[in-house]
Image (spheres, grey):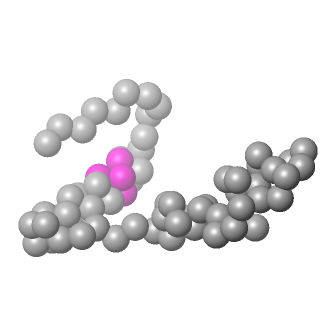
Amino acid sequence: MTIKVVRGNPTPEELAAALAVVRARAAAAAAAPPGAPTSRDSWSDPSRIASHRLPQPGPAAWGRTYWPG
């Protein structure tokens, strides 16, 4: 694996920290059994945004079709 810094000038400590995170994520992905479902954060869950009721007609109805609450 080759990592190339294309912008900025990181210190050796910053580069080591970034590489540690990348290696830890790669090791976790490699350790997962094949076909295992990946966990998703709740913020990226589409059902969080989906409305359970239709918005009432009005000037701001288009905004209520997407945003929760």
In percent of the image, x 28 and y 55: which residue is there? 22
Name the foreground residue: 69 vs 22.
69
Judge whether residue 32 is colored magenta: no
- Specify the segment rendered in magenta: 15-20
Query: If the image is split into quadrants, where does the N terminus sit?
Result: top left
Task: Kindly give the residue lying farthest to the top in the view shown.
Answer: 6
Q: Can residue 63 be seen in this view?
A: yes
Splitting the image into 4 quarters, where does residue 29 fall?
Answer: bottom left
1 left or right of 58 in image: left
Residue reaching furthest to the left: 34
Q: Residue at x 17, y 37 (%)?
A: 2
Percent position of residue 36, x then y: 18, 71
Residue 16 visible to the viewer: no
Front-most of residues 44 and 7? 44
Question: Is residue 28 shown left or right of residue 69?
Answer: left
- Please identify the quarter of the rendering in which residue 39 is found: bottom left
Q: Which residue is drawn at 61% across and 61% down?
A: 49
Residue 40, horizontal then vertical, whole percent: 40, 67
Indicate whether residue 17 is drawn in magenta. Answer: yes
Most extreme residue toward the right is 59
